[in-house]
Image (tube, rainbow, N blue to C red):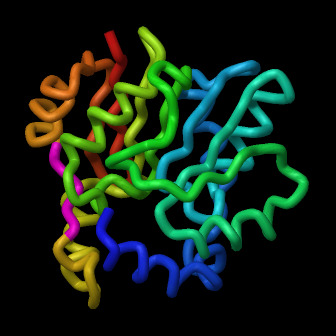
Amino acid sequence: MSRAHREYFNKLAEEWHTEMPDDPSFRDYLIRFGVSSGDRVLDIGAGTGRMTKYLAEIVGKEGLVVAEDIAEQMLFEGKKLLDRTPQEWVCDDVLALAFKDGSFDRVLCFSAFPHFTSPLSALREMKRILRKEGKLLILHTDSSTRLNEFHASQEGVVCTDVLPSINEIRPLLNQAGFVEEEFVDKENLYWIQARRL
């Protein structure tokens, strides 16, 4: 992400949890993705932790959840909201993640992918920190078409941010070294699931 994105999301952080409310169905998405007890999961672009708390519940004490975001104020607000939820909070750039190769079983990228200035570089970093056969999920609760229309209607840096269609993201995943598992791009669901070889 760019410095402009960081500043944009930092300004929204205090009200983010009310503007982007929680949804119990989030947990169902994680179960569908196959997150289970003992997993090590990186929540990329975690914001205030809408998915982080469900991840922590599922992986349990034997697992690990790391909430990563470039906007430190988002993480600050998340810590306040989820003060009793065990996880780590890391302010980091998805284009240069501060984790060793093969550190995680799964990577979740929820409602963040359009904001990455270099999607291919971000995918390569996600692949690097995944263990062999580890899995990636890029998830949105809207189609790429509708989300892109929404971003275009906004003011500020996000007005040019684009979520790739299936046909656009497929070659990026292949170049990054992922194998396709499940692709959905329809009303109310964008689900791109892939696996590292």
* Above or below 87: residue 142: below
- Tell me: 18 left or right of 107: right
Is residue 133 one of those drawn in magenta?
A: no
Q: Of 164 and 144, which appears nearest the observer?
A: 164
Q: Position of residue 115 (x, y in %)?
A: 30, 62
Q: Of 167 and 100, which appears nearest the observer?
A: 100
Q: Which residues are magenta?
A: 161-165
Q: Residue at x 72, y 31 (%)?
A: 64
* Above or below 140: residue 159: below
- Tell me: 187 left or right of 144: right
* Above or below 79: residue 126: above
* Location of residue 32 by image quarter: top right
Residue extending furthest toward the right: 84
Q: Of 91 and 40, which appears nearest the observer?
A: 91
Q: Position of residue 76 (x, y in %)?
A: 69, 70
Q: Position of residue 89 (x, y in %)?
A: 67, 53
Q: Residue at x 34, y 35 (%)?
A: 125
Q: Position of residue 26 (x, y in %)?
A: 61, 47
Residue extending furthest toward the bottom: 155
Q: How many marks?
A: 0
Q: Main secondary structure of the magenta part?
A: loop
Q: Residue at x 49, y 41 (%)?
A: 98
* Location of residue 143 by image quarter: bottom left
Q: Residue at x 34, y 74 (%)?
A: 3
Quarter the C terminus occupies: top left
Quarter the N terminus occupies: bottom left
* Location of residue 43 by image quarter: top right
